[in-house]
Amino acid sequence: MSKTLFEKICDREIPAEIVYEDELCVAFKDIHPQAPVHIQLVPRKPITMLSNAEPSDQSLLGHLLLTAPKIAAAQGYPDAFRLAVNNGAAVGQSVFHLHVHILAGRPFKWPPG
Ligand code: 5GP
């Protein structure tokens, strides 16, 4: 199967401003930022979307949630950030490789639009 866009970024085949990486995940700045801080945190494993994750992905998903706050803190927002996961085209998912949006640096409304 061909690589996803985000796999190519993880593998440095497509340039991106990578801000964090470890053996399980990579985080890089969004190409069209919606906030002063807008980072994509992606597992190296190309899970298409959250609803396609499997029980065996439990520790990986936990790792993403535990890593996101560290990335937000490193960007200067240890206690004021929003995480978003779009699951499916109908709610705005455009890249079908699971990713956690990390957003910070401006006020956010609730509920999100
Ligand atoms: P989604 O709409 O799937 O939830 O989010 C995909 C995100 O990936 C969008 O915020 C979009 O701006 C970002 N994105 C799409 N293509 C690229 C790219 O080539 N490089 C980077 N850094 N971000 C991208």
Image: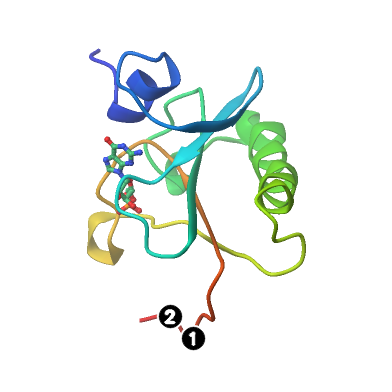
Kind of residue at disc 2: Pro
Q: Residue at x 72, y 33 (%)?
A: 59
Separation (CA) of disc 2 from disc 1: 6 Å
Residue 80, by quadrant, is bottom right
On the rendered structure, is 22 left or right of 96? right
Q: Position of residue 43 (x, y in %)?
A: 53, 30
| Display colour scheme | rainbow
Q: Residues within 10 Å of mark 2 (few under 14, many from 20)?
A: few
Tag of residue 112: 2
Q: Position of residue 68 (x, y in %)?
A: 66, 47
Q: Secondary structure at mark 1?
A: loop
Q: Out of 50 and 97, give the one closest to the viewer.
A: 97
Q: Ligand 1 is in which quadrant of the figure?
A: top left
Residue sitting at the far bottom:
110
Kind of residue at disc 1: Lys
Q: Position of residue 89 (x, y in %)?
A: 23, 56
On the rendered structure, is 105 left or right of 5? right
| Residue behind label 1 places its C-beta within 8 angstroms of ligand 1 | no
Q: Out of 3 and 76, give the one closest to the viewer.
A: 76
In the rendered view, tell whether residue 61 sits above or below residue 84: above
On the rendered structure, is 104 left or right of 8? right
Tag of residue 109: 1
Mark in front: 2 vs 1: 1
Q: Residues within 10 Å of mark 1 (few under 14, many from 20)?
A: few
Q: Residue at x 49, y 86 (%)?
A: 109
Q: Residue at x 37, y 64 (%)?
A: 34
CB under 8 Å between callouts 2 and 1?
yes
